[in-house]
């Protein structure tokens, strides 16, 4: 019967525990959040009193609650606070691990304000370990984040820490600069403790720079403020600083008095720290524990002498077992320390890699911005060169002037091609080139490319032969624009280096599976060929056969690099075979999907028609917004030749006023202008006129900026220097009422 009662009691106890556990699991989140804040407040009080172990205990409890209620922000802050306490009790390795956890959480939450605090503490730990360069990097990151988050009061602590590092490195001028910033911010926000510390550190710097009077005044001012606020650490620092300054000045009596006060205060601070040690950690207690342990061991030895041989053997075995266990424990302890140090090193390296990654991303962004600026600055004068050349060629020049004008036009076109090649390489390297698949006729595409380049081949007295494998389908799905660009580059290259010779263009199948074809294209010539030494470098940017070849045949050395990049984007490969004096063959293989549903396109002869002649242009008005006088004149003349009336203004403010006063059919808006930019002017116009057609007439070409044009309200972009056909097509669409579909952002 008693056993039955026992079972009932156990069942009831388990049931009650389950009920209480369920009640605890549904505990109000607000109550837990309030407990969390109470623990944090108590931890701060304990830390300020120097009771670091009590502070650690409260922080551990607050972390458990924060994880329970999934409070990510407070989890990051608590890990930072724990790290600070661990550092204060001389546990830098554990502090680094806590900081690493804090950094991961705060980065994940985009909690940049608290991340800045964490970076600051990380820098302090590195500085105490004399890893000054790492410390400065973290201080700089911390300061940047505080500035980004507009938290100026916190910056004074970072600049003070930076100054201490510079002092340790004897970089006194840089330390002086950071201390001046600290003093200004500390005075602005009444940060008395920080101000006193900054003045004391500034006194050290002034003394090192032989500014002894200033050093003495700064140290005394720092001491006065520290005494007023009862900051014993700063008071102690001031005494030792004053002692060093007096000694340097030969005032040994004052130096002695200051060092005496420093020693007395140091003893007082040490006693306070000893009082704040947790129970069981004092030296006296440890000594008593050791004495008791030795006495017990002595008693055991005496008992062993009195016992039998069997008991003696048992004791020896026990001691051996204890020794082995102790050695194992020691080994585990050492292994744990090694693992802890390894983890710390890994976290440190990981942080370094993250910083390096951020620097690399910044460098890449800087490179893109540089290319955007250089492109605009090159294209703007190039617009004037090509525009004026075309105008002069159309105005019946004298016969002896025509060769010069054609040479000028060729140079302008060459420079434009070079700029476009650089931008294409940049896009490929930045992985910003996207595949645009569509159905097309491959055989017709090859024939069109050959036809387009046949005049260049005839000029070289070179014949092009085309071989398309019998039975190979003609219609495929793929990015025909990129395939055309590859073929034009390779065939153009073959024509350039082949005179009085032959070129063969071949296409045939390598493999076929489920409608997917692997095709090989060959462009073979019997031209000058390439040396074996140069063949390995032909696909690198700016690589050419030799300086002599560059001078004789021209070219930028970017064509093959672009070809290789495009083929890799199409998931293909390219290689070559060449022999000097006998010719070169380029092979490239790409996968294409057979489009069996597509009808075989019919070849149609395209007649060039001037679309503008079909429109009534008598009442059409166009506004040109352009700050460059030459570009104004060129654009206006081009429009006048098309029988179009236009007004010209040279800034964004004037453009807005003109649109308000008069009715225009089209606005050609430049982007970079004095005053408000073309983007801002267009945004303002769109507030009162949603229907007006506005084209961005600009030299900016980087695709990562194109979304800004769409957001501003532009209908389309006309890139300078523009092609006449493209310009007329877009104007015709705007003036005829057709829907404008932009290839840039629609």
Image (cartoon, rainbow, N blue to C red):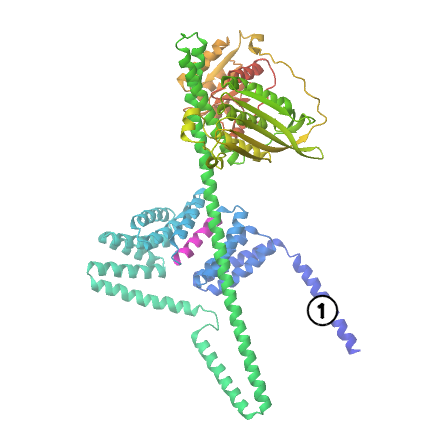
Q: Is residue 281 left or right of residue 65?
A: left
Q: Main secondary structure of the magenta part?
A: helix
Q: Position of residue 609 (x, y in %)?
A: 58, 10
Part of the protein shown in magenta: 113-128
Q: Is residue 50 above or below residue 157?
A: below
Quadrant of the image containing the N terminus: bottom right
Name the image quarter holding residue 446: top right
Of residue 171 and residue 743, the one placed in the foreground of this image is: 743
Asked if residue 91 is among those painted magenta in the image, a careful observer would answer no
Residue located at (41% from left, 14% from top): 405
Residue located at (56% from left, 79% from top): 321
Q: Position of residue 2 (x, y in %)?
A: 77, 78
- Which element carries disc 1, helix, strand or loop? helix
Camera sees residue 43: no
Of residue 431 and residue 615, the one placed in the foreground of this image is: 431
Asked if residue 121 is among those painted magenta in the image, a careful observer would answer yes
Of residue 636 and residue 720, the one placed in the foreground of this image is: 720
Q: Position of residue 306 (x, y in %)?
A: 55, 93
Name the image quarter holding residue 465: top right
- In the rendered image, which residue does mark 1 sit on? 13
Quadrant of the image containing the C terminus: top right
Camera sees residue 21: yes
């Amino acid at each position: 019967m008693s056993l039955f009662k026992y079972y009932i009691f156990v069942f009831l106890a388990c049931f009650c525990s389950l009920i209480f556990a369920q009640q605890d699991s549904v505990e109000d989140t607000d109550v837990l959040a309030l407990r969390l804040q109470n623990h944090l407040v108590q931890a701060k009080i304990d830390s300020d009193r120097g009771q670091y172990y009590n502070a650690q205990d409260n922080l551990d409890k607050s972390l458990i609650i924060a994880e329970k209620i999934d409070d990510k922000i407070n989890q990051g802050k608590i890990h930072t606070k724990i790290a600070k306490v661990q550092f204060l009790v001389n546990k830098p390795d554990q502090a680094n691990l806590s900081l690493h956890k804090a950094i991961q959480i705060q980065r994940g939450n985009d909690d940049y304000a608290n991340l800045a605090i964490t970076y600051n503490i990380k820098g302090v730990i590195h500085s105490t370990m004399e890893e000054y360069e790492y410390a400065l990097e973290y201080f700089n990151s911390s300061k940047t984040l505080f500035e980004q988050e507009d938290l100026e009061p916190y910056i004074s602590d970072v600049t003070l820490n930076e100054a201490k590092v510079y002092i340790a490195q004897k970089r006194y001028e840089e330390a002086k600069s950071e201390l001046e910033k600290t003093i200004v911010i500390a005075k602005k926000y009444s940060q008395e403790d920080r101000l006193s510390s900054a003045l004391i550190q500034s006194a050290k710097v002034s003394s090192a720079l032989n500014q002894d009077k200033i050093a003495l005044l700064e140290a005394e001012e720092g001491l006065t403020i520290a005494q007023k606020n009862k900051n014993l650490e700063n008071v102690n620092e001031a005494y030792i600083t004053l002692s060093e300054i007096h000694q340097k000045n030969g005032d040994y009596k004052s130096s002695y008095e200051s060092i005496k006060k420093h020693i007395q205060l140091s003893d007082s601070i040490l006693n306070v720290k000893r009082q704040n040690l947790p129970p069981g950690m004092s030296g006296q207690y440890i000594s008593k524990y050791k004495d008791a342990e030795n006495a017990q061991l002595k008693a055991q030895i005496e008992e062993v002498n009195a016992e039998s041989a069997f008991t003696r053997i048992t004791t020896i075995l026990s001691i051996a077992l204890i020794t082995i266990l102790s050695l194992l424990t020691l080994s585990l302890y050492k292994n744990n320390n090694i693992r802890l140090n390894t983890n710390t090193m890994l976290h440190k390296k990981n942080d370094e890699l993250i910083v390096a990654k951020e620097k690399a991303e910044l460098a890449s962004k800087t490179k893109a911005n540089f290319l955007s600026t250089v492109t605009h600055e090159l294209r703007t004068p190039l617009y004037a060169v090509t525009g004026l050349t075309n105008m002069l060629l159309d105005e019946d020049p004298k016969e002896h002037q025509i060769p010069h004008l054609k040479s000028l036009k060729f140079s302008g076109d060459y420079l434009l091609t070079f700029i476009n090649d650089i931008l294409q390489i940049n896009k490929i390297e930045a992985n910003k080139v996207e595949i645009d698949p569509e159905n097309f006729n491959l055989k017709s595409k090859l024939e069109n490319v050959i036809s387009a380049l046949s005049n260049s081949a005839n000029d070289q007295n070179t014949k092009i032969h085309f071989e398309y494998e019998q039975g190979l389908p003609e219609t495929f799905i793929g990015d025909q624009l990129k395939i055309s660009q590859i073929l034009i580059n390779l065939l153009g290259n073959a024509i350039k280096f082949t005179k009085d010779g032959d070129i063969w263009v071949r296409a045939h199948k390598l493999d076929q599976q489920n409608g997917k074809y692997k095709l090989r294209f060959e462009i073979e010539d019997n031209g000058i060929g390439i040396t074996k030494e140069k063949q390995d470098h032909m696909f690198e940017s700016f690589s050419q056969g030799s300086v002599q070849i560059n001078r004789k045949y021209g070219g930028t050395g970017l064509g093959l690099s672009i070809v290789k990049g495009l083929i890799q984007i199409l998931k293909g490969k390219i290689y070559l075979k060449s022999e000097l004096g006998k010719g070169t063959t380029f092979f490239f293989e790409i996968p294409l999907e057979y489009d069996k549903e597509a009808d075989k396109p019919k070849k149609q002869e395209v007649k060039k028609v001037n679309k503008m002649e079909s429109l009534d242009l008598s009442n059409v008005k166009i506004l040109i917004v352009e700050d460059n006088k030459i570009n104004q004149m060129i654009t206006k003349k081009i429009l006048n030749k098309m029988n179009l009336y236009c007004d010209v203004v040279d800034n964004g403010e004037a453009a807005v006023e003109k649109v308000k006063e008069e009715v225009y059919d089209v606005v050609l808006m430049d982007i970079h202008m004095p005053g408000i930019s073309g983007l801002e002017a267009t945004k303002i116009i769109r507030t009162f006129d949603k229907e007006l057609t506005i084209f961005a007439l600009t030299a900016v070409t980087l695709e990562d900026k194109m979304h800004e044009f769409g957001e501003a309200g532009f209908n389309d972009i006309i890139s300078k220097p523009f092609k006449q056909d493209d310009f007329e097509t877009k104007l015709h669409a705007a003036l005829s009422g057709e829907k404008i579909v932009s290839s840039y952002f629609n």
